[in-house]
Amino acid sequence: MIVVDKKKYKMAINEVAKEVHVQVHGLMKEEDVEGYMIDLQDTINKVSKQQYTFVVDATHQTPVPSKVLPQLEGALQFYNSLGFKDILVVKPSSKIAQVQVRNALERIKFTGTFIDSVRHSM
């Protein structure tokens, strides 16, 4: 069930699989972040986090400029701290973005799993 469908991002709850999916398209601009965070909070408040897996579908993530890497790390650290049963991050299709995300996950000591593709799409 798609909960949020905006130009830059989507959020969905799959009650059967007990998953919350977030997907960002391209690069988030600063002016998009506040709305994203509000929508994210509204979405995750609809589920029992201890029973759900949080899926970050980074398939459409584009490479980020080096000055933006700290924000990428911060976002991934935030996801890591939400208290979900498990966290899956889907590898970006861009090889450069894939390396950026993988390196950021290593730096934050990510406790979830970096996967090739999503099991249940939005």
Image (cartoon, grey):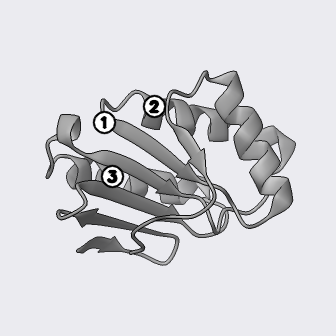
Give coordinates of residue 13: x percent, y percent: 25, 63
Q: Callout 1: 10 Å neighbours few (<14), some, many (20+)?
A: many
Quadrant in the picture for residue 3 = bottom left
Q: Amino acid at mark 3?
A: Leu
The residue positioned 21% from the left and 53% from the top of the image is 42
Q: Callout 3: 10 Å neighbours few (<14), some, many (20+)?
A: some
The residue positioned 31% from the left and 56% from the top of the image is 20
Task: Please report whichever mark, 3 or 2, sits nearer to the chain's N-terminal start.
Answer: 3
Q: Amino acid at mark 1?
A: Phe
The residue positioned 42% from the left and 73% from the top of the image is 121
Q: Quadrant of the C terminus?
A: bottom left
Q: In the image, 120: left or right of 27?
A: left
The residue positioned 30% from the left and 36% from the top of the image is 84
Could you tell me how far apart the alpha carbons at marks 1 and 2 are, in whole angstroms?
8 Å
Query: What numbered label is drawn on residue 80?
Result: 2
Total numbered labels: 3
Q: Which residue is mark 3?
A: 40
32, above or below 104, in the image? below
Could you tell me how far apart the alpha carbons at marks 3 and 1 are, in whole angstroms?
13 Å
Q: In the image, 13: left or right of 95?
A: left
